[in-house]
Amino acid sequence: MLRRAYQRALEISSQRLKEHELTPRQGMAIVAIGAHGAMSQAELGQDIAMEPANVSGLVDRLKKKV
């Protein structure tokens, strides 16, 4: 039953991300910023387990979507 609940949650979150044209990692970044407020790109990278060199590109792509 737990496995089915996880699969359903994954389906719903994937669908919501697609509606907003976001990748899963972009969604994670938005949630992290919403939860913690302003943070450096290094802090964001640590929070979403992303290499610092890639965080800059992620942030740039998110800014273009605004």
Image (spheres, rainbow, N blue to C red):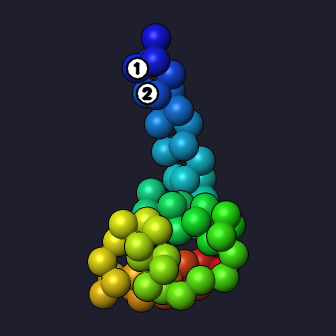
From the image, which quarter does the C terminus lie in? Answer: bottom right
Q: Say which element carries label 1.
A: helix
In the orientation shown, which residue stands out farthest toward the top? 1
Residue neighbourhood size for the residue with mark 2, other residues' Cα within 10 Å, grouped as few (<14), some (14–19), many (≥20)? few
The residue shown at (51%, 61%) is 28
* Residue 46 at x, y percent in the picture: 41, 73
- Residue 23 visible in image: no
Which-is-in-front pick, marks 1 and 2? 1
Q: Quadrant of residue 49?
A: bottom left
* Residue 19 at x, y percent in the picture: 59, 53
The residue lying toward the viewer, choosing from 41 and 65, is 41
Structural distance between the alpha carbons of marks 1 and 2: 6 Å
Instruction: Report the side of 62 relative to 57 (left or right).
Output: right
- Residue 65 visible in image: yes
Amino acid beneath label 1: Arg
Instruction: Report the side of 33 relative to 43 (left or right).
Output: right
Q: Is residue 36 above or below residue 2?
A: below
Q: Say which element carries label 2.
A: helix
Tag 1–tag 2 contact (CB < 8 Å): yes
The residue lying toward the viewer, choosing from 43 and 10, is 43
Instruction: Report the side of 33 relative to 53 (left or right).
Output: right
Q: Where does label 1 land, which residue? A: 3
The residue shown at (46%, 11%) is 1
Amino acid beneath label 2: Gln
Q: How many marks?
A: 2
Q: Where does label 2 land, which residue? A: 7
Q: Is residue 22 above or below residue 12?
A: below
Q: Quadrant of residue 21?
A: bottom right
The residue shown at (55%, 53%) is 17
* Residue 65 at x, y percent in the picture: 59, 78
The residue shown at (41%, 76%) is 45
* Residue 41 at x, y percent in the picture: 48, 86
